[in-house]
Image (cartoon, helix red, strand yellow):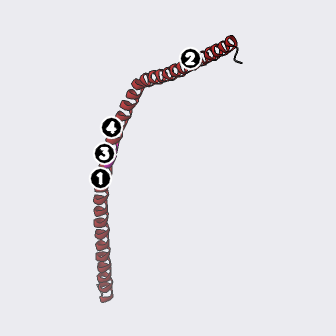
Amino acid sequence: MTDAERDRLHEMNGRLGALEGEVKHFRQTWEHQDEKAGTRQARLYDKFEELIRGMAGLTFRVDQLAKELSELKPSVASLTGNHRENIGSKKMLAFVWTVILAGVSAVSWSAVEVVKLILGKH
């Protein structure tokens, strides 16, 4: 083997060593990134699980509130009806008293006029 061939073999050996170093570096980088991605993926999965549990609890709470609201609806309707009846009763009572007072006033005025006629003071 000649010196030129040895130099070329030595140069090729150096290049193969450098290539091997780069491949090892890429492999280590890939493994590190894969490990980080796995950790991130696990954290993301945990966050999704937490979110799903929260949504399930929220769904349960909304269902409870809807049930309570449906139970309260007839009571509210009844109270509204009673309130309207009370208002109607008060208005009717006020109308009746107005009619009674108007009637009493009319009878009183008529009585005064009759008395004036009888006594001749007109």
Q: Is residue 95 magenta?
A: no
Type of amino acid at the residue the image marks with label 3: Glu
Q: Nearer the viewer, mark 3 or mark 4?
A: 4
Q: Are marks 4 and 1 in contact (CB under 8 Å)?
A: no
User: Bounds of the magenta span?
Assistant: 47-51
Q: Which mark is residue 50?
A: 3
Location of residue 52 by image quarter: top left
Q: Residues within 10 Å of mark 2 (few under 14, many from 20)?
A: few
Instruction: Locate residue 107, reporting x and y percent.
Output: 62, 14
Q: Residue furthest top?
A: 118
Location of residue 12 by image quarter: bottom left
Residue tagged 2: 96
Label 3 vs label 4: CA separation?
11 Å
Type of amino acid at the residue the image marks with label 2: Val
Q: Residue furthest bottom?
A: 3
Q: Nearer the viewer, residue 33 or 109?
A: 109
Label 2 vs label 4: CA separation?
58 Å
Q: Secondary structure at mark 1?
A: helix
Instruction: Locate residue 40, reporting x and y percent.
Output: 31, 56
Q: Which mark is residue 43?
A: 1
Label 2 vs label 1: CA separation?
77 Å
Q: Is residue 6 left or right of residue 93?
A: left
- The tag earlier along the polypeptide, 3 or 4, is 3
- At x 70% / y 14%, what residue is drawn? 120
Label 4 vs label 1: CA separation?
21 Å
From the viewer's perspective, is residue 3 above or below residue 100?
below
- The tag earlier along the polypeptide, 2 or 1, is 1
From the viewer's perspective, is residue 37 above or below residue 71?
below
Residue tagged 4: 57
Q: Secondary structure at mark 4?
A: helix
